[in-house]
Amino acid sequence: MKKILLLEGIHKVARDILEEQGFYVEEEKGAFASEEDLINRAKGFHALGIRSKSKISQGVLEKLQPHLEVLGAFCIGTNQVDLEYANQCGVPVFNAPYSNTRSVAELVIANIISLARHLGDCNMKAHKGIWSKTAIQRHEVRGKVLGIVGYGHIGSQVSVLAEALGLKVIYYDIVKKLPLGNAEAKESLEEVLKEADFVSFHVPETHLTKGMMGINQFRQMKEGAYLINASRGSVVDISALVEVIQSQKLRGAAIDVFPKEPPNNKEPFVSELQGLPNVILTPHIGGSTEEAQKAIGQEVALSLTQFFKRGSTSGAVNFPNLEVPPIKDFRRIINVHKNVPGVLGEINKIVSENSGNIQAQHLATDTHIGYVVMDIGGCEIQKVAQEISQLKTSIRTQVLEHFHEGA
Ligand code: NAI
């Protein structure tokens, strides 16, 4: 039975799913302060589930061999894991990059209405005992133009929700993207900036997006427009934003991500934007909801299940991706090997020498490794796997014969 250790208070749904699938699960509420403690606790487990605080270095991976077969990062980022070394050990790493898409999209919608009605300032004043009732420069969002920059998972969700509110959506993406609903693609960022009442950024951090919203871009925006950034802190030049808010070129902004963010809730937060009118500042909470945590738990638990039961590596961040069907009447061998010429020939030779019949064979490779999943019959599978594992090129070889779907 595969043994799985979950650390850092991963959502309960993950344990429920994994146990239901017949795995043995243990849990720890927190992360380990030292690598040594982590290694001692995780030794012998076949899978490790972590969030952002557990650092999985080369040293940790080395010590957890040969048992550790797979890592579940129950979060979005995977910087805490030495992905390259995990790849070379034949350990796929799964995360859940899109589980919080809806949460971010909903925050953006909340921001659009809040900016149009100056809710942030009204709320702050009311708490201080100031009655500040006015209709001047307060607007409905119906009929206004929302410009989305980056029409990926989040951008396109925002598009759908915004249209339901009666906004007209235009967008710009470097890749050609199918417009949803009545949204309209624009050829350039400039076109979006010129036409939109609200501009919302949903791009990743790349060399092209760093500082993509600077003073020249702000100057191209409509008078009295609003800016929203819930993507990455490096995308918007904060000093330029301060300038256009102070000059009243822009009527407000909602910022959830910053170039420099406190590492935890105990450290102070400092920004040039503090104290500016109709500027909503939130502590990178776009994806922080219980629903997103649950979705992360479900997604990664499913990836671990499909890896153990089928050998599927679809969605792994550091591994050749293979989506394979459930095991039916055959038995399955998975093999991770060094990506050098001739490996598949050697593997197939072993199967044929054992009078095995290959029913299906799937192969995917990356720079360093190759990953093959094959269904075979008519031979002694443990013997075949043993011989394949002896090849000089083999990194990890396993038989999946005991794991049938829905065990
Ligand atoms: P995605 O990868 O699905 O979409 C990004 C889109 O941006 C793609 O369509 C891509 O083609 C486009 N793009 C890339 N470079 C571009 C450029 N130079 N100009 C125009 N378009 C460009 O990513 P997803 O999931 O929609 O996430 C978007 C951003 O949201 C990411 O930066 C992510 O880190 C951030 N995010 C923020 C959260 C928060 O808590 N505030 C939570 C989750 C994600």
Image (cartoon, rainbow, N blue to C red):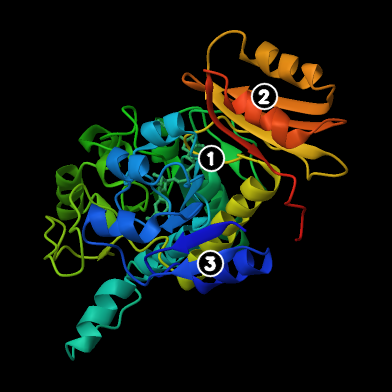
Q: Give yes or no for contact between labels 3 and 1 (Cβ–Cβ under 8 Å).
A: no
Q: Residue at x 43, y 29 (%)?
A: 88
Q: Give yes or no for contact between labels 3 and 2 (Cβ–Cβ under 8 Å).
A: no
Q: Residue at x 62, y 46 (%)?
A: 307
Residue picked out by circle 2: 363
Q: Give yes or no for contact between labels 1 and 2 (Cβ–Cβ under 8 Å).
A: no
Disc 3 or 2, which lies upstream in sequence? 3
Q: Residue at x 52, y 73 (%)?
A: 12
Q: Secondary structure at mark 2?
A: strand
Residue picked out by circle 3: 25
Residue 122, numbered label? none
Given the image, on which type of amino acid does mark 2 rest?
A: Leu
Q: Position of residue 73 (x, y in %)?
A: 44, 52
In which quadrant of the rendered view does residue 234 lie?
top left
Distance from Cα at disc 3 to Cα at disc 1: 21 Å
Q: Secondary structure at mark 1?
A: loop
**Relative to residue 265, is residue 377 depicted above or below?**
above
Q: Position of residue 57 (x, y in %)?
A: 29, 42
Q: Is the residue marked by circle 3 packed among few (<14), some (14-19), or many (20+) residues within 10 Å?
A: some
- Number of numbered markers: 3
**Relative to residue 363, is residue 47 depicted above or below?**
below
Q: Secondary structure at mark 3?
A: strand
Give the side of residue 49 with respect to residue 328, left or right: left
Given the image, on which type of amino acid does mark 1 rest?
A: Ala
Residue 316, numbered label? 1
The mark closer to the camera, 3 or 1, is 3
In which quadrant of the rendered view does residue 325 lie?
top right
Q: Position of residue 318 (x, y in %)?
A: 47, 34
